[in-house]
Image (cartoon, rainbow, N blue to C red):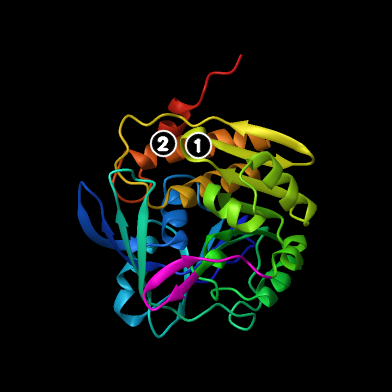
Amino acid sequence: MSKISATPDICCIGHITHDKVITPKFEAHMPGGTAYYFAKALAGLDHSSFRLITAVGEDNTAVIDELRADGIDVTSLPSRHSVFFENKYAENMADRAQRVLAKADPFTTDNLAGVQARIFHLGTLLADDFSFDVIKDLSQRGIVSVDIQGYLREVVGDKVYPVDYEIKCEAMPYIHILKANEMEMEVLTGLTDPYEAARTLAEWGCREVLLTLGEKGSLIYADGVFHEIPAIPAKEVVDTTGCGDTYMAGYLYMRARGASYQEAGTFAAAMCTIKLEHKGPFNGTQTDIEALLPVTS
């Protein structure tokens, strides 16, 4: 287990998965999950103030060595199994059928005791990864950022079904930053208009709402102001897996450095474009990102 001597800007907490990815263009087994895609995205940037806390089974420890070889500070908690996802995509890469073939042990207030960071990003994959007590506990130590996807996934057998987050109104005041895609936004709020949905999430207590809208870009709502972030078209969409995690890595990276909402969102959008054009996680550099950013006068 690695040690960290100072409080990092960002601490991502989440399971690294064993993913079987099936697309019209390829089939492969690879690591996955928010923890993996988020860490790999930051590996190409200045990750000196980033820490990853994850949990994998004994048969999946090679991925920990891989991330440490990238220079990532990783703490790996024991787990009986790793999460095992099968993701099958249609010709339209937005259409995904998902199965869960194994689950990992949840994160608890006990095994996260003493962890410090300015921003905690919780990469939820399944509804029981993080209890409400974990969110409340971490919110007393720093800003809590949540990718809501896992709380909206119910596993029945090996199939994944969308469900509502039953305690959402109780939890939102403890969640400073919330990220959701269009489908998740609708499940959470019952609304299809992203502007109305963002306002509703803010009324429930969330201070910074990020809605990713695919080809339509993304929408950030904070301090009562909307920030529209255009998508940067990819030359070719090869692999969408982990795109939302890449977006959050870029966004939090920039926000931790004092960037505005618009600047952070645009930087995150550029990272997503680079990620979309390649199989696997983000593999670009700061220079690659900056080359895609719009020129400002």
Could you tell me which residue is drawn at 69 percent across and 77 percent down?
Answer: 133
Cα distance in 3D space between marks 1 and 2: 6 Å
The picture quadrant where one finds residue 259 is: top right
Q: Which residue is mark 2?
A: 273
Q: Is residue 79 left or right of residue 253?
A: left
Q: Is the residue marked by circle 1 packed among few (<14), some (14-19), or many (20+) residues within 10 Å?
A: many
Could you tell me which residue is drawn at 45 percent across and 39 percent down?
Answer: 271
Q: Is residue 218 above or below residue 152?
A: above
Could you tell me which residue is drawn at 57 percent across and 46 percent down?
Answer: 253
Disc 1 to disc 2: CB gap under 8 Å: yes
Q: Does 3 lie within the magenta span?
A: no
Q: Residue flagged by tag 2: what amino acid is it?
A: Thr
| Front residue of this view, candidates 156 and 63 | 156
| Front residue of this view, candidates 15 and 78 | 15
Please give the range of residues in magenta.
154-166
The picture quadrant where one finds residue 134 is: bottom right
